[in-house]
Image (cartoon, rainbow, N blue to C red):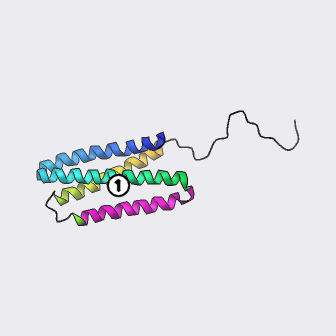
Amino acid sequence: MPSNDVRILIQAAVPTAVVGAVAVAIGGAVEGGEGAIGAVVGAVVVILFMGAGLYVLQWTAKSLPTLFQAMALMMYMAQIALMFIFIVLFRDTTLFHPKVFALSLLAGTLTWVAAQARAQMKARILYVEPESTTGEKKETTGRSS
């Protein structure tokens, strides 16, 4: 993974982990151990899904740039759908508190998207390949001066 991609991943994952830690503290204070476990599971699911999605999008941008925009839209829709499925599957669980899990998932997702958008805007990624400066000169046709 190139350094820009790693930087964007870190700039999105760290704030999400911080929000997850706050969610664990709040969930633990409000709902006890089950709340803390629900918040941990929610934060981990967000970081794994969104991190994997970012990795796939970076791979797509490099190998299939013509499909990047469509792939990005499809990836975000799939991530939101998978998180919704997780909420539905675990709504009646006794392993952790499902409402804390859902709120942690929501807060983590919003944090990830905002942090990733900020990181992308601040990144200085070239969208045009600069000409080579290795000393190769192009031959010009036309009049010489």
> Which residue occupies 21% across, 63% down?
90
Decide if residue 116 is on the left or right side of residue 101: right
**Which kind of residue does numbered mark 1 sit on?**
Phe
Pinpoint residue 28: horizontal percent, then vertical percent.
14, 48
Comparing 91 with 124, the one in front is 91
Q: Mostly what secondary structure, the magenta segment?
A: helix
| Quadrant including the C terminus | top right
- Check the image and name the residue furthest to the top: 135
How many marks on residues? Answer: 1
- Residue 106 in the image, given as x and y percentages of width and height: 28, 56
Residue 134 figure quarter: top right
Q: Residue at x 25, y 47 (%)?
A: 20
Question: Can the viewer see residue 21?
Answer: yes
Residue 110, visible in the rendered structure: no
Q: Position of residue 93 (x, y in %)?
A: 16, 63
Residue for point 49% across, 52% down: 59
Q: Nearer the viewer, residue 66 or 19?
A: 66
Disc 1: which residue:
49
Q: Is residue 8 above or below residue 91?
A: above
The stretch drawn in magenta includes residue 77? yes
User: Is 58 left or right of 93, judged from the image as shown?
Assistant: right
**Magenta highlight range:** 65-88
Q: Is residue 131 magenta?
A: no
Name of the residue lying farthest toward the left: 32
Q: Secondary structure at mark 1?
A: helix
